[in-house]
Image (tube, rainbow, N blue to C red):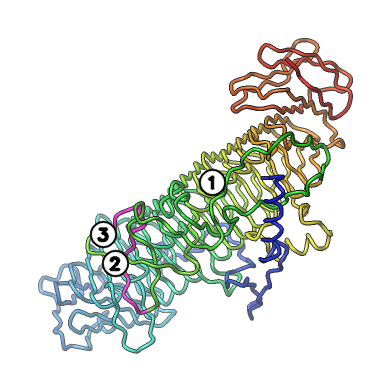
Amino acid sequence: MKNRNRLVLLTSLLLISSMTGCTQKVEMKETDAGSGQDDAGHASVSTVTLTEGKYSEDKLDDTWDEDNAVYLKLKGDRISVEERRDTEAGDSVSDDDSSLAGDGMDHIEVEGSVVTITGEGTYVLSGTLEDGQIIVDAEKDETVRLVLDGVSVVCGYSSPLYSKGGNVIVILAEGTENTFADAEDYQYENEGDDEPDAAIFSKDDLTFNGTGILNVTGNYNHAVHCKDDLKFVTGTFVVTAADDGIVGKDSVSVKNGNFTIISGDDGVKAANAEESDKGYVLIEKGSFEITSGGDGIQAETLLRINDGNIDITTNGGSGNAGKSSDMPGGRKQGTPPENMPEEGDEREGMIPPEGEPGEGVAPPDRESGEQMVSAEENSGERRIPAKGAPRGLVETGMAQPEEGMVPTDGNESDSGSSKALKSYVDLIIAGGEYSLDSCDDAIHSDRNITIESGTFSVSTGDDGVHAGQKLTVNGGVLDISQSYEGLEGFEITINGGDIRIIASDDGINAAASKDNGTEEVQRSMEAKGFPEEDQGAVMTFNGGNVYVNADGDGLDANGDIFINGGVLTVHGPVSGGNGTLDFASVCKVTGGSFTGIGSAGMAQNPSDDSTQPVLVWNVNEPVEAGTVFSVYNGNDESIAEITTEKTAQWFSVSSPELKIGETYTICAGDVRKQAGLESTVTQIMLED
């Protein structure tokens, strides 16, 4: 958005001089593994090349040998052990037995309401444990199969399922419902300990399969936390957590499954930022309903979704954005926009403003990285307490916590982010159906986003899709019904897809901001010697069907716009302080179909070096919404037709059917005028 007011310009210059600008370099930290991290400690490099998850045969197998299994019967405050399912009495074990003899029994230790599994094997659990633990303490390469056959475990002092070591495979038996819930406060053996910290906690690989149901309630911190690779093959999961719902440090892979997640912070997260080939989330299929206080699904290196049904609401949704005094990672309310030219600067094709500029749309306040919600609208606040402190499920105003769970308050430094889908490096979507209602960006990467296909319904309090570096759309149906800015990135390329954008500020914005001021972007800007308003950003349309309705600039590039193909319709601003097209260098039209409507105060015409003819016209007074504009050739055949959705004074049409040297008839309601197309970009005045 642009504003010519001198006072605002002076304020902008003062602010720019007093804070870190968009040209600041982000230093990279190199680890021994050759991965990069940014100053905040998040991944800046990804070497993940996977397009689908990696599953060994034993992790895909949800069957077990009943004759060779050990059966653990949970009975209130006691645990009994049986060698076979059909054993009536079984080999009951007393509380003081610490060693069990017999084939398949030698890896079991029972002490009161705690059972410890020390070696590989298959262990079938059933019954109810009112206050106890299932502990796995095997070697890393030993496979321990836990069959949940209708089990409920509550632990009042720690994690009810704690794997200290071993390759653990959890099988959800068909037709069963299983439950694990932890304490609100953990008791650790040693001062300073911080593990376990989840209702289901594993230090080595953890895999879930089977067709049963698993309910996990993390009252203390996370619901499921794996310090290695976390995999879901099948199953139904109902997850509630005070902090993150599902965390895999090295990776989270989902082959299929049904997930309902309510979390105080992130819904699903991969947390390894130190190794560039880890820290990824890879979803091949499945159904997700996530209600989170933080990000819905977050990855450090790569977030890739191939298919599935994804329904995410973050921090109360888009309707909660206006109640937050600060939105993370963006412009602060009242701060003048970037790329505001000096007074008198007349860029190529610009029509000078007439009179006072109109009022712009104030962006949400996004400077501090926190979410501050009024008490009237959100009675519970989210916090992440210090490790070892009591934790409870947080009310986010989106969903009610489970009975007995305690809301907390406060903030955590990185918890201001409430994006629906987020990666710090690469984000790839290759299919699926998405319903995203986010307080912050709906789809976000600090670096690159690629959308191959998928159907998206997006409502956001900030950007619909935001890429710090490259944003590429090759296909899919993207409906952004509410946003601050629809699409944003430094290098935006639209090759295909059906895109519809409603934006309170810019519809599509190509720029480098402090959100995307990565080292790669800064090197490019510095090497090319771009001034501040021309950052070298690029917006390219090669195909697709794109509709934009923006209160700010329709298409805004701190650099170049190239229209090479596709069908592009832009309903720009009513305000004279913005334009349907806003570019710092060129807007070159070489193909496709372009129709633009908007205000005249800051309008820019496509560049004269366009190779496809462009017809531009203005009217003396703004026409009302609902006015039909048409262009006809000499044979009275329609070249273009569009109906104004807001008041407008500036109109532009480019089509392969326009030919230089021919005469066209322009109709605006009942007004008709003939115009000869004398040059590549021809501008006329349409008077009543």
Segment colored magenta: 388-402
Picture disc at residue 402? 3
Picture disc at residue 147? 2
**Label 2 Cα neighbours within 10 Å, binned few <14 / some 14-19 / many ≥20:** many
Residue type beneath disc 3: Glu
Residue type beneath disc 2: Val
On-image quarter of the N terminus:
top right
Viewed as shown, does residue 501 lie left or right of 247?
Answer: right
**Label 1 Cα neighbours within 10 Å, binned few <14 / some 14-19 / many ≥20:** many
Residue bearing mark 1? 431
Give the dominant element type of the magenta stretch: helix, strand or loop.
loop
**Label 3 Cα neighbours within 10 Å, binned few <14 / some 14-19 / many ≥20:** some
Residue 613, x across and y down, in percent: 83, 28
Residue 30, x across and y down, in percent: 66, 77
Q: Is residue 528 magenta?
A: no
Q: Secondary structure at mark 3?
A: loop
Q: Looking at the picture, does residue 83 appear above or below residue 421?
A: below
Q: Nearer the viewer, mark 2 or mark 3?
A: 3
Picture disc at residue 335? none
Name the one closer to the observer, 228 or 674.
674
Q: CA distance from mark 1 to mark 2?
A: 33 Å
Q: CA distance from mark 1 to mark 3?
A: 33 Å
Q: Earlier in the sequence, mark 1 or mark 2?
A: 2
